[in-house]
Image (tube, coloured by chain):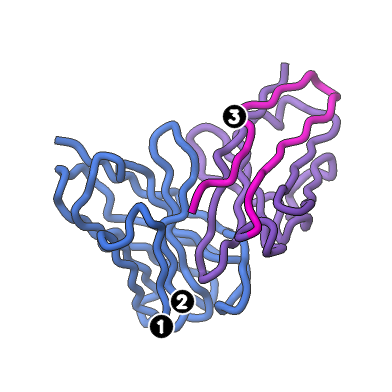
Chain colours: A blue, B purple
């Protein structure tokens, strides 16, 4: 099982960026998928989730209204569209797969990708 | 969506036991038996070590254990070794597909 993130970079405040994650080695369309971020030298923060069937998504308050999570199961891909970026969005963004398929119960996160770094700076 | 509260740092001598607390609320840790723990070393991605409160992964040493009581989860490391030096994070399901992580604890072996 593997997830690989891409799309990070250096952007200015107020701009947009789209992150991509591709999953392999598991039945991608059976699992809700999440984004978790970690600011430099800081702790982990759950960012967003999208259900396996794309029907439900949820966001941390810190990104609600600015970030949109989506997925394309035919491409085994997860996306995070980030807009109105702020300095405090600077972080490594991890795509994480839950250990348990479906949306009925909570789960854990495994595996983790290497992450992709987003730097918001003027 | 407030972060779960962990001590910023815990230290111990080799062979000693330490316990890291993870304090949440009745909306997260207290409501669900979906607490997980992650170990992170510098420059690396977090690694799952415990899930569903107390279930250890196949890679975790049996010197480590995890539990929960009420709104607080615990990670205990017995027989502390230098290889245990890392940052540790708890995570709890919070309902509606959302999760909340702990503030993180740096473990130092003296």
Q: Which chain does the residue under circle 2 lie in? A: A
Q: Which labelled disc corresponds to residue A13?
A: none
* Labels 3 and 2 positioned on one and the same chain: no
Magenta stretch contains residue A75: no
What residue is shown at x 42% (from left), y 59% (from top)?
A35
Q: Are marks 2 and 1 in contact (CB under 8 Å)?
A: yes
Q: What residue sits right under mark 1 in the picture?
A: A55
What residue is shown at x 45% (from left), y 35% (from top)?
A42
- The front one of B24 and A12 is B24
Q: Residues within 10 Å of mark 3 (few under 14, many from 20)?
A: few
- The kind of secondary structure element at disc 2 is loop
Highlighted range, magenta: B1-26
Q: Nearer the viewer, mark 3 or mark 2?
A: 3
Q: Which chain does the residue under circle 3 lie in? A: B
Q: What residue sits right under mark 2 in the picture?
A: A51
- The kind of secondary structure element at disc 1 is loop
Q: Which chain does the residue under circle 1 lie in? A: A
**Quick check: A75 left or right of B21?**
left
């Amino acid at each position: 099982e593997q997830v690989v993130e891409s799309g990070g970079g250096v952007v200015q405040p107020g701009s947009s960026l789209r992150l991509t994650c591709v999953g392999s080695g598991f039945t991608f369309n059976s699992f809700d998928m999440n984004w978790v971020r970690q600011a430099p030298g800081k702790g982990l923060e759950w960012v967003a989730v999208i259900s396996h069937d794309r029907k439900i998504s949820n966001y941390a308050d810190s990104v609600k209204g600015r970030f949109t999570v989506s997925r394309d199961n035919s491409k085994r891909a997860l996306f995070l569209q980030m807009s109105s970026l702020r300095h405090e969005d600077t972080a490594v963004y991890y795509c994480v797969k839950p250990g348990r398929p479906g949306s009925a119960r909570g789960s854990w996160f495994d595996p983790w990708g290497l992450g992709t770094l987003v730097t918001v700076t003027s | 969506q407030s972060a779960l509260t962990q001590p910023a740092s815990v230290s111990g001598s080799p062979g000693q036991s330490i316990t890291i607390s993870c304090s949440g609320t009745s909306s997260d840790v207290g409501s669900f038996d979906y607490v997980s723990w992650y170990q992170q070393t510098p420059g690396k991605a977090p690694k799952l070590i415990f899930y569903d409160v107390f279930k250890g992964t196949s890679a975790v040493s049996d010197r480590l254990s995890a539990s929960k009581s009420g709104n607080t989860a615990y990670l205990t490391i017995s027989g502390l070794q230098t290889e245990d030096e890392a940052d540790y994070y708890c995570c709890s399901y919070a309902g509606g597909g959302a999760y909340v992580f702990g503030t993180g604890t740096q473990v130092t072996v003296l």
